[in-house]
Amino acid sequence: MLQTLRRIVQEVNSTRDLNQVLEIIVQRVKKAISADVCSIYLFDSDEDGFTLMATDGLNAELVGQVTMSHSSGLVGLVAQRTDPLNLDNAQEHPRFELFTSLNEERYHGFTGIPITHHREVLGVLVVQSKSDNRFSQDVVNFLVTIAAQLAGAIINAQASRQIPIYSTQEVSNIRRDYRPMIGQPGSPGVAVGKAVSIASSVSLSAVPDRPAKDVDDEINIFRVALESVRQDIKSLSFQLLSDGLPTEDVAVFDAYLLMLDSNTLIESTISKIETGNWAAGALRETISEHIKLFGEMDNPYLQERAKDIRDLGQSIFNQMEEINELPVDKLSKETIIVAEDISATLLAEIAEANISGIVLKSGSRTSHVAILARAMGIPTVVGVSELPIMQLDGSQLVADGYSGKVYISPPEHIIREYSRLISQEEELSEELKALTDKPATTQDKINIPLYANTGLVADITPSKESGAEGIGLYRTEYPFMIRQRFPGEEEQSEIYREVMESMAPKPVVLRTLDIGGDKSLSYFPIKEDNPFLGWRGIRVTLDHPEIFLIQLRAMLIASIGLNNLHILFPMISTTREVDGAINLLKRACEELLTEGYQVNMPKVGVMVEVPSVVFQMRQIASMVDFVSIGTNDLIQYLMAVDRNNANVAELYDSLNPAVLAAIKVVIDESHKEQIPVSVCGEMAGDPLAAILLLGMPIDSLSTSAASLPRVKWLIRNFTQTEAKELLEKALLMKDAYVIRKMLTDCIEKKGLGGLIRAGR
Ligand code: PEP
Ligand code: MG
């Protein structure tokens, strides 16, 4: 059964057309379990019911014509209960409804399985038999397994239906119900523009379709890549033979060469280029057709060859250098970048082109790419798990970075509405600029200094221009990430000096190297099963004092004469680590003094990111000068939710009462030691959360330059007393939904709705 399941799933995943996907499922499933009928009903929002979309066994002429509501028939019952239904004689069931035109009367045995995706019932998979025996439990288990795996493929195929691919596509046949795709808000703002798909991964299967600029050039690119792979294989095979490898073992390369020379591979790719796709997209289409063909074969040996085809396709693709290049000439103010994920360095490159927005399939609000996008003020939606990247290039998109909605090829009225909201946002930004030199003081005269987060990009100008009262978090990873080796003391010192000098006398908090988790260095790979629970932040630097000392010395040297340096240690989980880090800092300081540098011991702080620190807060606070709460990680560890995983992003909520309670403990315990507390995680820039932090009461906030003016506007429109009252109520509430509702109502009532949604 497992083998059959794998084959069906593989075949379905390599097919894009929804009807074809459904046809494959009904035919293969019917055969696999020897049923007499297999059908799929999918939810249709226009009809508000489940419409027969494919059948092998019933009257196929009625596909698309028969719809069952939630309250009618057995299909409606399965959807209503979201539970499999297995009957020996369907016709005796009180909910049975006969559609004579479907020719159902002959069938008795009935099993219906709900097809669900993220708790939503997409449809129902039904199998029927003439006999009046129930299907076995094994069959039911098989159907449940297949329905669970196919839901994603159905969603993908449904999504692709809305998208015109390139000019050869029959646009008029495309059904448009304009339900937006739902992701997570990544960076506030709204973007209306044309998609430019980027194959961020080096996987051929992730290559987008893109119109061929010049058919002859594209054919040439394909031929050159093919020839180069052919030469590589020949020389490898020759070398292995001369190394003494038996001829039979090297024979596999002959098979590869045969495949490369096969007319179907070459002709099929060229003909796809001729119909308008570029070389990489055409190759992807051809290879996926071949994989499907081999995968369908009954012979296990031939099935295995599907893998060889995939590898070969990938090798050809790797030779097409153009794919790895950013299509810079296509980027403009109207561009919305669409990708699986993008690296920090690529994002920095993209941002220079002044694009309109970003939509990513992976990630969540606190992934580093979202943090960067916010720092750059680029409206971004992340975690759109159904995003059909490959087919979006050139499509009109609307991306709403507040709600996480993405509209693909929307009708004119949606574009008009969002364009209007963009103008309102621009007006609001102008008004917010007027606040740049004003303090973040509440109406009852409490001052909450606002600092800027920076560091993942080289340029700190936006932080300076945002009116920040200093840098509350400088992530030092970036200079490490863009190099081919660890940067030396002098190199680092120059970078830190520039930051501190440009902000002096305002304070600058430099965080020591925080690699591991989702931040890796190409020259220092860390391979772990659970990187977020592994060797991260201070754990790495304490294990490598030589790297740590260079960084600490560089920071101290850079601060000479400025005296605005604060050093912050990331990923602390025990008091021993605090001791260890402070001791190394003292050592660096002493060394430099003996070498004749006039350095001072800076203020030292720890990040609260690990729950163990919350429960030892008073002790830890007594060891340092300041505390900074890194809510991005604290929430991830408190809630056991990977901050980058779109599947569980809904659970990741800074308004969760447990999160609020933990932050309250950190602040109360630190204040008992007269130690000030700041929040430097993304929560500080979320207007709703900032109200509650104000009520805690937090001493300062550090956020991206783009969010800072909005948080300032909010603080200036509240009193701390009001915020305390709201916090008191929130701490008694049961979950984040009610808390969010209370805060949203409050913000709207004050006329500050523009902080949390598109428009003014
Ligand atoms: C945090 O965890 O909240 C934080 C600010 O650090 P980073 O996002 O860099 O992990
Ligand atoms: Mg962190």
Image (cartoon, rainbow, N blue to C red):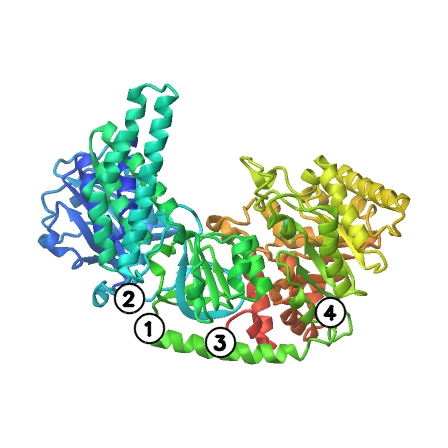
For discs 2 and 3, the disc positioned in front in the rendered view: 3
Q: Is residue 115 visible?
A: no
For discs 3 and 4, the disc positioned in front in the rendered view: 3
Looking at the image, tell me whether mark 3 or mark 1 is earlier in sequence order. Answer: 1
> Which residue type carries mark 1?
Pro
The label number, if any, that marks residue 176 in the structure image: 2
Task: Give the residue displayed 35% in from the left and 42% down from the top.
Answer: 314
Task: Give the residue displayed 38% in from the left and 56% down from the top.
Answer: 387
In space, the residues marked 4 and 2 are separated at their CA atoms by 50 Å
The label number, if any, that marks residue 422 in the structure image: 3
Looking at the image, tell me whether mark 4 or mark 1 is earlier in sequence order. Answer: 1
Looking at the image, tell me whether mark 3 or mark 4 is earlier in sequence order. Answer: 3
- Confirm or deny contact between disc 4 and disc 1 (CB under 8 A): no
The label number, if any, that marks residue 411 in the structure image: 1
Task: Give the residue displayed 19% in from the left and 49% down from the top.
Answer: 96
Q: Nearer the viewer, residue 161 or 289?
A: 289
Looking at the image, tell me whether mark 2 or mark 3 is earlier in sequence order. Answer: 2
